[in-house]
Amino acid sequence: MQYVEIKDLTFSYEEGKVILENIDLNVEKGEFICILGQSGCGKSTLLRLIAGLERPSSGTVCIDGEEVTEASLERGVVFQDYGLFPWMTAGKNILLALEQKYPKRPKKELKEIVYSKLKEVGLDRSVYNKYPRELSGGMQQRCAIAQALSIESPILLMDEPFGALDAVTRATLQDMVRNLLEGENRKTVFFVTHDVDEALLLGSRIIVLGQSPGRIIYTCEISKDNRPTRDTQFTNPAFLEMRNQLIGYINRDVAEKLK
């Protein structure tokens, strides 16, 4: 049995527009799945279906043999817009998630977990008392990642989390996520992006969705021992060939829709 099994998944809105069609995907524990494709192909919708925030029109999403029917703290979500309540400090945003996951644990103990998670994502304790508006975009996203990591969900869903950030901050957070989610902290990750280079840098498997309705048009796997780094992703011939293949599939899909 696969850890995450998506079978014959189709999703459409009430007005009848089909967003995703016949998605089949099996994922093992610890995989880092990058979902790649152009805007409007259903990447974020697929993530919401895995999260339990939407229900499929047909087909199923199962985790450890159990069908997903609603949202759960077993699946942490990081959104592009950070998902922090603006009327609460960064620390209390993280604390709120912990209180939901561990309602019987002392608040003092949970607060120490918040501090440790802030440190884990490269932020100091003073951020606890700052409101989101007082933080840069990169710092807000670090807080959102800390929030998702704090509840110790075995599955992490990330919806273009770095799409609104500048290039330097984006690269820094990519490296941070890559380092955080290896070894003992390894999780099963679904990471939505439209950036081919980001997918190659982070993913152990890349899935390309075609457009309207979204369906899987290409997949490729990247072994742990053969992953690109910032030094090799634009110089290694094998990685450049993989990059060109991914871009080629996306461009051909776009060209077919324009005909």
Image: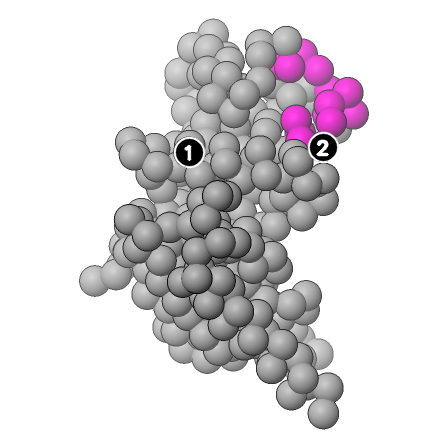
Give the image location of residue 57, x and y in percent. Answer: 52, 74
> What residue sits 32% from the left and 52% below the top?
226
Amino acid type, mark 1: Asn
* Numbered disc 2: secondary structure: helix
Q: How is the image coloured?
A: one colour
Report the side of 223 relative to 206 (left or right).
left
Residue for badge 1: 179
* Numbered disc 1: secondary structure: helix
Q: Quadrant of the C terminus?
A: bottom right
- Decide which of 45, 53 is in the foreground and name it: 45
> What residue sits 40% from the left and 62% below the top?
238
Amino acid type, mark 2: Gly
- Decide which of 117, 123 is in the foreground and name it: 123
Which range is magenta?
A: 127-140
**Residue 72 among magenta residues:** no
Give the image location of residue 198, x and y in percent. Answer: 55, 51
**Residue 133 among magenta residues:** yes
To which quarter of the image does residue 125 belong?
top right
N-terminal of the two: label 1 or label 2?
2
Task: Give neighbour class at mark 1: few <14, some 14-19, many 20+ (Cα, 10 Å).
Answer: few
Q: Is residue 77 above or below residue 195?
A: above
Residue for badge 2: 137
Report the side of 80 relative to 134 (left or right).
left
CB atoms of marks 1 and 2 within 8 Å: no
Q: Residue placed farthest to the bottom in the image?
A: 259
> What residue sits 65% from the left and 88% below the top?
256
Q: Quadrant of the N terminus?
A: bottom left
Q: Is residue 181 above or below residue 44?
A: above
Task: Give neighbour class at mark 2: few <14, some 14-19, many 20+ (Cα, 10 Å).
Answer: some
In space, the residues marked 1 and 2 are separated at their CA atoms by 20 Å
> What residue sits 52% from the left and 54% below the top?
234
